[in-house]
Image: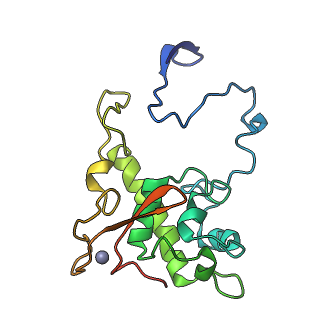
Amino acid sequence: MIWSIDHPDHGPMDLIYADPRRFGFIDLLDQIEDSPYLKGLGPEPLGNQFNAQMLADAFRSKKAPVKAALLDQRVVAGLGNIYVAEALFRAHILPTVMALSLVTKDGHPKPALEALARAVVAVLTEAIQVGGSTLKDFRNAEGGSGYFQHSFAVYDRADQRCPTPECTGTISRIVQSGRSSFFCPVCQKQP
Ligand SMILES: [Zn+2]
């Protein structure tokens, strides 16, 4: 779908919306705060409010696996299946671990949760630098494709060797809440 718009600073432009997986929609608002869809969203993972303590506050009452907790948009906004898999891999945490188990009794993040918060930021920052992850027919504004999909460590790599140096594991795939989880059963652990 293409909208021709008249941008106040840049003049006439085309706004192109391609949604091959049909997860998205467009809403027109005067004020972004008016959107019912944005109310209750958690912080942006690359924003100032995102950190290990904020995750600990969200996780301490969560009776759900850490993977589901990270995909919950009320906890963190905008983290998808691919980056959750990559972040859990980097932090050496199994996706099946209970979110609650990453928090100390007095509500502080355990070291593994601090590693996970750092991994989320690192994975997203790298993904943005290389142009995002994309479906095959993705094109950015310059007409190029995204590249991060070529450098996933675990996502969509079932039965391949784990890329962690000196790890002898093989990447596994399981289904959690209807979504694929990819992980190394050797170097990802219950912290
Ligand atoms: Zn491994």
When asked about the image quadrant of residue 106, the answer is bottom right
Please indicate, yes or no, whether residue 130 appears anywhere in the rendered image. yes
Q: How many marks?
A: 0
54 up-or-down from 22: above or below: below
Query: Which residue does the image show at 60% across and 64% down from the upper left?
Result: 69
**In the image, residue 180 lies at what x, y percent?**
43, 58
Please indicate, yes or no, whether residue 122 appears anywhere in the rendered image. no
When asked about the image quadrant of residue 108, the answer is bottom right
Does 38 sit left or right of 191 as displayed? right
Query: Which residue does the image show at 28% across and 60% down from the upper left?
Result: 157
For the residue pair 154 and 40, the one nearer the viewer reads as 154
For the residue pair 186 and 51, the one nearer the viewer reads as 186
Tell me which image quadrant ligand 1 sits in: bottom left
**In the image, residue 130 lies at what x, y percent?**
32, 47
When asked about the image quadrant of residue 98, the answer is bottom right
Does 148 sit left or right of 3 as displayed? left
**In the image, residue 191 lies at what x, y percent?**
49, 85
Does 95 sit left or right of 144 as displayed? right
For the residue pair 41 and 167, the one nearer the viewer reads as 167
